[in-house]
Image (cartoon, rainbow, N blue to C red):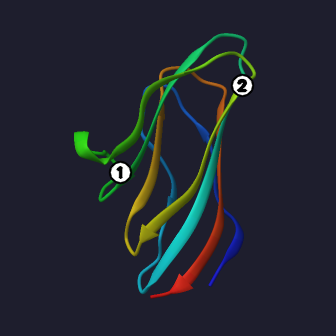
Amino acid sequence: MASGRLGASDVGAGAYTTVYTCPASTFAVVSINILNRGNSSASVRLAIADASTPTAGEFIEYDTELTAKSLLERTGIVMQAGKLLVVYTNVANISAVAFGIETAA
């Protein structure tokens, strides 16, 4: 079982990016930092999804504004096996880092 940094991505503009997938036969407690490295505001979405393109009911953040050089942090996200942590943004220069612990189910 892994612990520490579980996934990291340079999130591209206009596409859903899977930052972390919880492995089979485990559950995970995850935190995620989404950082706007750019000089203009960004709109970000975050979902705990069954697939790489989330459905409307899977979002935990939706079009949340991140001003230039700012950070969105969500902690204590409990994920079951097979779930994906998915990030979307409308601009480039967005980093997403998931960290936490995986435990046998």
> Which of the 4 image quarters holds residue 34?
top right
Q: Could you tell me the amino acid type at mark 1?
A: Ser
Residue located beneath label 1 in the image: 52
Compared with 28, 95 (above or below) is: above
Q: Which is closer to the viewer, label 1 or label 2?
A: 2
Q: Quadrant of the C terminus?
A: bottom left
Q: Residue at x 42, y 39 (%)?
A: 16
Q: Earlier in the sequence, mark 1 or mark 2?
A: 1
In this figure, which residue is indicated by the disc labeled 2?
70
Residue 57 rendering spot, x and y as whole percentages: 24, 44
The residue sitting at 66% across, 26% down in the picture is: 93
Helix, strand or loop under label 2: loop
The image quarter containing residue 56 is top left
Furthest-front residue in view?
Answer: 76
Q: Is residue 55 visible?
A: no
Q: Residue at x 47, y 82 (%)?
A: 26
Q: Is residue 79 above or below residue 69?
A: below
Please, what secondary structure does the residue beneath circle 1 have?
Answer: loop
Residue 16: mark in rendering: none
**Image spot of residue 101 (x, y percent):** 64, 73
Whole-Å distance between the Cαs marked 1 and 2? Answer: 25 Å
Q: Position of residue 29 (x, y in %)?
A: 56, 68
Q: Amino acid at mark 2?
A: Ser
